[in-house]
Amino acid sequence: MVLAKDKRFRAGVVLDGWMLPLEDNIYAQVTQPVLMLNTETFQWKRNVLKMKNLECTQQNRIMLTILGTCHQSSTDFQFLCNHYMGRIMKFCHNLAPKDAIDITGKIVQGFLCKIIGITDKELREDLLTGKHEWLICGTNVNLEKTDH
């Protein structure tokens, strides 16, 4: 993770991250704010538990999950075919592609503007705090259940 090695980066954004390849000692080396923005259907317990190592509200490290989304929802790939076909092929989910991209962009922009002190942009606090109909703070993954 570049944030641990290069402190010139003032913040990090993890879009539906895959954390398992990272060594456990890397998390303690990250001192910058981090936004972990996940989709509803991609994450699993072991991966989210790794992300939780970065989560810390005092240091502006937050995890949000966009409901109604899949892994491709934050890319332009979902616009290549109609929504119905995308759902069958599992690269579109319940939230309309335009809405998924819009929410993702506004969250990332708001987070970065807040961190670097840009005040002339409308910061959507409802999005940054997970208080929106398509968002939850944290994860939808059940971290209590045991894995078999």
Image (tube, helix red, strand yellow):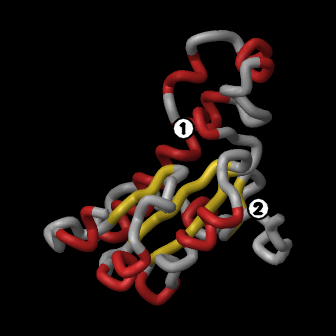
Are the residues at dot 2 and dot 1 in contact (C-beta closer than 8 Å)?
no
Measure the alpha-carbon separation of dots 2 and 1: 17 Å
Number of the label disc, if any, that sits on residue 102: none
Q: Residues within 10 Å of mark 2 (few under 14, many from 20)?
A: many
Residue 98 percent coordinates (x, y): 61, 29
Could you tell me which residue is drawn at 39 percent across and 78 percent down? 27
Residue 69 percent coordinates (x, y): 69, 41
In the rendered structure, the answer to whether residue 7 lies left or right of residue 96 reads left
Residue 97 percent coordinates (x, y): 64, 28
Q: Residues within 10 Å of mark 1 (few under 14, many from 20)?
A: many
What kind of element bears circle 1? helix
Three-letter code, disc 1:
Ser
Three-letter code, disc 2:
Asn
What kind of element bears circle 2? loop
Could you tell me which residue is drawn at 75 percent across and 33 percent down? 93
The vertical placement of 21 against 73, above or below, is below
Number of the label disc, if any, that sits on residue 140: 2
Assign the N terminus to one quadrant of the image.
Answer: bottom left
Residue 126 percent coordinates (x, y): 63, 63
In the rendered structure, the answer to whether residue 90 lies left or right of residue 103 reads right
Could you tell me which residue is drawn at 50 percent across and 32 percent down? 75
Examine the rendering and report whether any part of residue 91 can be seen: yes
Number of the label disc, if any, that sits on residue 74: 1
The vertical placement of 124 against 53, above or below, is above
Could you tell me which residue is drawn at 32 percent across and 78 percent down? 30
Q: Quadrant of residue 37?
A: bottom right
Q: Nearer the viewer, residue 143 or 86?
A: 143
Closer to the chain start, of discs 2 and 1, is 1
- Residue reaching furthest to the bottom: 58
